[in-house]
Image (spheres, helix red, strand yellow):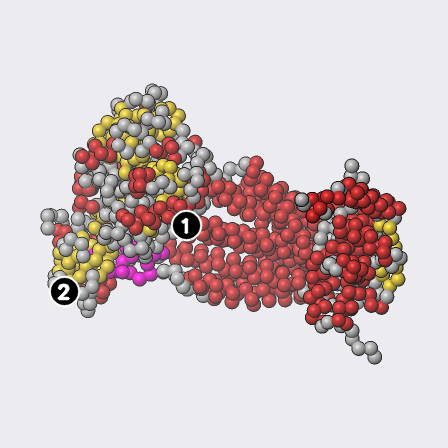
Amino acid sequence: MKKFQLGEFEEVVLLTVGVLYPDAYGVSVKKEIEERLSRKVSVGALQSALKRLEDKGYLKSSEGEATQERAGRPKRYFTITALGRKAMEYTKRTRDELWAAIPKMALHPKMTGI
Amino acid sequence: MKAQEPHPPRFLLRFFRWFCHPELQKYIEGDLLELYNERLQQSSKRKADWRMAGDVLLLFRPSIIRPTQSVDYINPHDMFKNYFKVGIRNILKYKVFSFINVFGLAVAMSLCMLIILMLADQHRYDAFHEKKTRIYRILTNYEGSRQGYATSPYPLAAALKTEYTVAEDAVTLMPGVGGDATYQQRIATMRGYFADPSFFNVFSFDLVQGDKKTALSAPFSVIISKALAEQLFEHENPLGKVIDFSDRQLAFPLEYDGIGAAPVKWGSLTVTGVLDPTAYKSHLAFDALVSTSTRQALINEKKVEDLSNNWEFFYRAYTYALVRPDKNEDDLNTALSDLVARKYANLKFDQVKGFNLTGQALTDIQTNLQGNDVNNRLPRIGYYFLSILAAIVMVLACLNYTNLSTARALTRAKEIGVRKVTGANRSALVFQFLSESIITSLLALGMAVMLLLFIAPAFKGLWVNQYLNFELPSTFEVYGIFIGFAIGVGIVAGLYPAFHLSLYQPIKALKNLGGASAGKLGLRKVLSVSQFVVSLFFITTAILIYQQFKHYLEFDYGFTSKNIVNVQLQGHDYRKIANAMSTVPGVSTISATDLIPAGNTNNNCEVRKMNTSGDYISMGKLTTDENFTSTLDLKIIAGKNLPAVSDSTSRFILVNETAVKEMGYAHPADILGEVFETKFGGELLEVVGVVKDFRYRLLINQHEIGPLVMQNNPSSFAFLNVKIASPNLMATVGKLEQTWKRIDPVHPFRYQFYDQQLASLHQGIFDLVSILGFIAFLAITIACLGLLGMATYASERRTKEVGIRKVLGAQDSSIALLLSREFVWMIALSIAIGAPLSYFVNNLWLQSLPNRIEFGMGILMLGVAILLALGLITIGSQTWRASRAKPVDALKVE
């Protein structure tokens, strides 16, 4: 059953929003992902992922302060909702279950050698 | 002071703001700017700009782009109803303006609709063939020819079928059947093609009676048209009946001035089928199809020429190829050029240089006229010409609408303000004004359909249409196109006013401070002036062409054409007919000739002085008898007339003055007795006399009179010129007809009065005058309507001013002058631009016309006077009315 829909990039974004709490907004999330995962993230990809997550109800946003370097444009802070938490937990749990179900031999092929 | 901070390229941000969802815009923009500033610290501005551009481009994705409908979208149905209601109310409230708009659009539309009808009519040709997309007619062309030929070499179809795979089938249509079909006592003229059984495989004609598979197989079988069957067999069943056929070499498929030959009996033809060509709209028309296998028997009897291996002679046969479904035009053309390369490598004839064969799609035939074609049609250039004229008139009418709507913007300003304040955005207002203009143009459509009821028959009645055969039937599809067209016109006409009016700021509009002050005309002036420039151009052009037409009609040909009747000999011996007719009382002289001088056919010959090696000189050639000079009142200025017919007469010739000069003689007398040889056949010609120059070619074809040779050769005579002395022309012609009937009871007496015949040659020009005159009339009508609207509006706007001025003691005339000044100035400007323009443009084409008139100031002045008169009447009617109004009424206006 597919209870929670969460793509790989969406999961990364969701987790990063959690990591950055309470300072998760566009630029900080982008930088965090780029730093930790050393992968390039475009503003477009990130924003559309954030919008999808918000539409699914995993994230909620609030308008933040406007600063000098943003030429007066407000920030938009994201926080994880209860549903978002459930989705994260569900994903993690399914991954753990899958990990647990892998036989040891499969991951250590050397041991099979006779 | 703070230094200017570097900022990202404005267009990037503007682009981003344009596409971004409004809810997300400010946040993402903030992110972008933050990143930009950060990058600016790390690297150069250029790099930061580029990276920003990349970011913006990557943001252009469905989840970020704004939805197409505006966010605050309310139930549109009620608004539509409101737009419609307001639109109708506005039209009804300002009846004068609405009428001007509707009428102007309708007039132009009806013209455009006529063109649409014509195009639709042409589009229906040959649409019934099931395989029409695969049928190609093969055209012939060679280097240096003026246009391609619709005909191709006779053996082509057979070669295409047997030596190439590109064509599934091919059919040759060979004209050459033209004579009298006889059944029992009934005789009818029958013209048509030789065709083989492939005809029915390529084309989708159906037989009313008979079997398509076998009808054209056996020799001496014939398929006749339904009309011919009714003529010959009346109520009998034509199938299997045998008709006698004598060929008279009647011209076919195009009817030129009917020159026939003495009848040759072909024998009996068996009717194997009846076809009704009138049931099909096709470029092919015929009375009969004779099986191609008949030709072999006729060739054996030497009654027709054997062309089955003749690749040089490409004037006689039409070839149609049916291309295989998996092949296309390119494949066909490749095969054809390969065929030409193989067959023509060792041939030597005049046109072999650059000789080529190409396919012409069947659907393209109707609008793409070729040389040697099967019928007369309006060539493509004609459609372009008419379409351009119609488009110009349509644009003028649309300008009117634009002009009047923007002029009247002030009356709508309050409404726009209220709508905007209550939440209408710009697109809604644009939509509203567009729907209004579409309503107007649909009303115009209704009126245009009525106008079309008058224009279409007038067009069909034009002289040219007897050759072009436009039927112009109206079908549902055509009406569908009309409605689409009207909506298109509505949008085009309303676009500028819609965008202009919807731009008003609500506050300004409500306070009536809008930018549209009545005094400033700007763009509207430009539009009006351009309308009058175009009108003036059309008026002068129409007058000019009319003058040219009159010039041709009154032209001095150098011979008498009055009271001469040209009688077609139709293959009879000229002496027999001439002798019989000379006994008719009232006939003064009778002469014979091979073609009508100054008509649309010519003959040429090439001559040079005997025993010299110089170039041959090309001369016009007329074959006439000895009476010709006296019938046409030609003056012999040196030597004597042609000798009467005897065996050696064809040696003696008359030449004209130009020929004398052309051959290098100073005086007409010097050429007498000189002997010339001709290029082909080397026949010797001895000059016996010199005639005064006269026009022997069509005026529109030749400016100067060229050299001419006249020779007495009875075998080629095709016309009698009967000069009538009695004052009662028709009575004499009636007697001539009786004489003809006695000699030839079968064929009708065909004659034309020479002067009328010459006049009718220029009838096409008069059609052009009619068309251009009509369009000039439309253009000036539309321009005046526009002017009327603007003048009415201007005087309405200034009613109060007029009232005050009058109270203060202004004269009626000075007020009329005040109100008209602006418009008079506009007309003056139009004339200043239009007059030189029409002078130069018209001179461009006039210079290339032979026997032209001088385009003098007179024509230009007449055009200007017409324009000025109409324009001043239009303005005056309004301003005079306004200036005469009672000041009390004027001051009460609010």
For marks 1 and 2, the one nearer the N-term is 2
Q: Judge left or right: residue B407 versus residue B149.
A: right
Residue at the farthest bottom position: B1
Count numbered badges in the picture: 2
Q: Identify the residue at horizontal 56%, vertical 62% (top origin).
A: B533
Is B699 within the magenta? yes
Left or right of B466 on screen, residue B294: left
Residue closest to the eye, B142 or B59 = B59
In whole angstroms, how far apart are the C-alphas of marks 1 and 2? 45 Å
| Residue B836 makes an appearance in the image | yes
Classed neighbour count for the residue bearing mark 2: other residues with Cα under 10 Å, few (<14), some (14–19), many (≥20) = few
User: How packed is label 1: few (under 14 Cα within 10 Å), some, or many (20 or more)?
Assistant: some
Q: Is residue B594 left or right of residue B438?
A: left
Identify which residue, A53 or B282, lies in the foreground: A53
- Between residue A52 and residue B558, name the one nearer to us: A52
Q: Magenta part mainly helix, strand or loop? A: loop
* Screen quadrant of the N terminus of chain B: bottom right
Numbered range of the magenta stretch: B691-709
Is B549 in front, or is B603? B603
SS for tag 1? helix
Counting from the top left corner in percent of width and height, residue B754 is at: 31, 48
Q: Amino acid at mark 1?
A: Gly
* Place of residue A87 in the rendered image (x, y in percent of width and height, measured from the top left): 83, 45
Q: Secondary structure under badge 2? A: loop
Q: Which disc, if any, is residue B764? A: 1
Q: Is residue B743 visible?
A: no
Task: Locate residue B613, reporting x and y percent.
Answer: 15, 64
Inspect the magenta stretch and tell me whether residue B310 lies in it.
no
The circle on residue B157 is: none
Identity of the residue drawn at 47% across and 42% down: B122
Look at mark 2 in the image and give the residue it sits on: B612
